[in-house]
């Protein structure tokens, strides 16, 4: 875009410069014998130089102004409110969380001080190794709930307790390193497959191959010329969306923690890959607490309980079959999606 602006500017400056040369030559002809040939040549030469000089300095002025925007952005970022400390003196035990019990108590959150609450008095408790499905209309607060769990959005009231520890009382590193998430948009970096699976180099090749096997990616990686050392382009552009999502799943398997968050992890993949992901999660994370934000309702029908959000509030919280029998919000959503269920 910047180069296009330069070309646009150059055309108009060249036009102005050519006009100056034209009028210099016209005035020299009109002057006739009043001007010597040397004066005429000097005026036309200066006019030609002005064209180049004008083009150069205007372009430099534009570049300086454009580069100055970067400095303004850096200064703006410096003035932004910083995140909470990365590490606090009070640190949880190395094995925390060892059970995966999550409790929300009158939790409130907003994205900015001048905005309304995105979550309003959210209260519920998850038991050890429980599988929870989180559903709701667009804007109900599903993703906000997970953002609060990672403290990307700080609380405005209430608290979140994981295995007896208020997450607001510990550092962000100790919290986020103990949680696992598979996002809706798979995140990959330029580098090898191995680097994307194990960026901190904490696992052996055998562990990586086992994770790939559980994600049904082993045959694909073995077919690559360099196998684990195959180069992945920025954002995983040389892989399909399903393959990217399965690599993120394999990464989560290697980082296996007691709490796993699925933020609409299967929303952008086909049904076959969705079934592979769900079956792998059911077997590999059977001893973990799993929170699933549902894009397709059939992915949460086998959850132990379902949390239904509406406008940032909990409107229903129970086993999926009981919610269907109540003929409430969840039952209506299931009916609208065309899912056949037994009463």
Image (cartoon, rainbow, N blue to C red):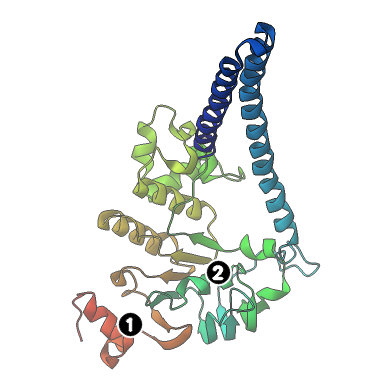
Compared to residue 227, the image places residue 249 above or below, namely below
- Tag 1: Cα neighbours inside 10 Å, few (<14), some, or many (≥20)? many
Q: Nearer the viewer, residue 109 or 243?
A: 109
Mark 1 or mark 2, whichever is nearer to me: 2
Q: Are marks 1 and 2 in contact (CB under 8 Å)?
A: no
Viewer-side residue, 283 vs 329: 329
Residue ID for mark 1: 320
Outermost residue, front side: 33
The reply, left or right, for residue 211 in relation to residue 269 is right
Q: Give coordinates of residue 88: x percent, y percent.
A: 78, 66
Where is 221 relative to 135, above or below? above
Question: Judging from the image, what secondary structure is the residue with disc 2 in?
Answer: helix
Residue depicted at x 46% and y 69%: 290
Q: Earlier in the sequence, mark 1 or mark 2?
A: 2
- Residue for badge 2: 147
Q: Can see residue 271?
A: yes
Residue lying at the far bottom in this picture: please name it.
326
Corner quadrant of residue 224: top left
Q: Residue at x 46, y 74 (%)?
A: 142
């Amino acid at each position: 875009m910047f180069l296009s602006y330069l070309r646009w500017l150059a055309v108009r400056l060249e036009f102005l410069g050519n006009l100056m040369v034209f009028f210099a030559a016209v005035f020299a002809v009109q002057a006739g014998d009043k001007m010597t040939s040397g004066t005429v040549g000097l005026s036309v030469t200066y006019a030609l130089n002005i064209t180049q000089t004008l083009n150069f300095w205007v372009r430099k002025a534009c570049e300086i102004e454009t580069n100055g925007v970067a400095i303004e952005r850096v200064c703006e970022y410096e003035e932004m409110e910083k995140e909470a400390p990365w590490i606090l003196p009070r640190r949880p035990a190395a094995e925390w969380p060892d059970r995966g019990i999550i409790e929300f108590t009158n939790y409130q959150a907003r994205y900015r001080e001048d905005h309304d609450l995105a979550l309003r008095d959210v209260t519920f408790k998850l038991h050890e190794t429980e599988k929870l499905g989180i559903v709701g209309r667009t804007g109900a607060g599903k993703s906000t709930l997970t953002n609060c769990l990672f403290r990307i959005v700080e609380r405005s009231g209430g608290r979140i307790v994981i295995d007896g520890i208020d997450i607001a009382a510990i550092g962000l590193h100790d919290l986020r390193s103990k949680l696992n998430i598979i996002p809706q948009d798979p995140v990959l970096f330029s580098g090898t497959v191995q680097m994307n699976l194990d960026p901190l180099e904490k696992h052996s090749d055998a562990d990586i191959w086992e994770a790939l096997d559980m994600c049904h990616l082993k045959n694909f990686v073995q077919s690559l010329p360099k196998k684990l050392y195959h180069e992945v382009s920025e954002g995983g552009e040389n892989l399909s969306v399903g393959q990217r999502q399965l690599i993120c799943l394999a990464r989560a398997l290697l980082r296996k923690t007691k709490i796993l968050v699925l933020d609409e992890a299967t929303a952008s993949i086909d049904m076959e890959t969705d079934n592979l992901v769900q079956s792998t999660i059911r077997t590999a994370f059977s001893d973990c607490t799993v929170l699933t934000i549902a894009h397709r309702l059939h992915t949460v029908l086998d959850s132990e309980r379902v949390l239904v959000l509406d406008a940032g509030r909990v409107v229903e919280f129970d086993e999926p079959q009981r919610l269907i029998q109540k003929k409430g919000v969840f039952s209506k959503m299931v009916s609208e999606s065309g899912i056949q269920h037994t009463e």
